Image: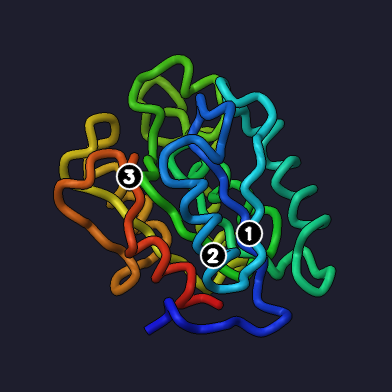
Amino acid sequence: LYRSMKMPALCPTVIICPGNGCSQIRRSNWYGKLHEILTEKHGIRCICENFPDPLHARREIWVPHMRAAAEKHASGTDPKNVILVGHSSGAQAALRYAELYAVHGIVLVSATYSDLGDAHERASGYYPQPNGDDKSGESNPYLFNKMKENCKKWHQFHSDDDPFIPLHEAERIRDGLGLSDTYYMLPGRSHFFDYSTELLDAVLSMT
């Protein structure tokens, strides 16, 4: 349905937020292919540019970078007129971005709730941490209410065989955002390293 449509002039700009370790974003995973399809087949402005600090993907660097991209490239010069497509670390950055800034829509791919005990991930600054000896609370919590206030359109994708992020981690994000019909558990997709038409359809459904 969506693949033959031409979008209006003020269609939101799509910003692809990659996983960490992707120093050449258009050659990594499915980012370049999604960019090509959106721009060439659908006439949608899509920003698929290298992020700074690609190995560590630190929140203090990535979220301001995303804001600068939104301010520079958003349709109609309105920085909230963007759709963030975040994969892996890029999904974590999109969540934290939405705590601070209004955004037209967000697609989360292979998002996790915690750092899963990985010190490198913990140092990126995205993840809540147990607070206190009894670990009954959290420091650096997700502000889901702010996320939902700033973004009304969410799609989330995860797979049952993701080798890095167990399904229950994604479900905690789903529950925090209150998603149901726009949460998709797609079997056998691993960490979504390959292009999926469902991601394209999710983006197009928000334009």
Pick whichever, 25 or 74, lies toward us.
Answer: 25
Q: Residue tagged by mark 2?
A: 38
Residue picked out by circle 1:
46
Label whose residue precedes the other's in the sequence (1 or 2):
2
Q: Residue at x 29, y 74 (%)?
A: 181
How far apart in space, not on screen, are marks 2 and 3 (Cα)? 16 Å
C-beta proximity under 8 Å, tags 1 and 2: yes
Q: Residues within 10 Å of mark 1 (few under 14, many from 20)?
A: many
Image height of 198 relative to 60, above or below: below
Which quadrant would the C terminus be assigned to in this image? bottom right
- State the residue in front, 197 or 161: 197
- Label 1 – label 3 distance at C-alpha: 19 Å
Where is mark 3, residue-wise?
Answer: 194
Q: Amino acid at mark 1?
A: Cys
Q: Earlier in the sequence, mark 1 or mark 3?
A: 1
Please rate how many residues cluster around mark 3, counting C-alpha atoms within 10 Å: few if below 14, some from 14 to 19, many from 20: few
For disc 2, the neighbor class at 10 Å (few under 14, some 14 to 19, many from 20) is some
Q: Left of 74 or right of it: where is 16?
A: left
For residue 203, the mark is none
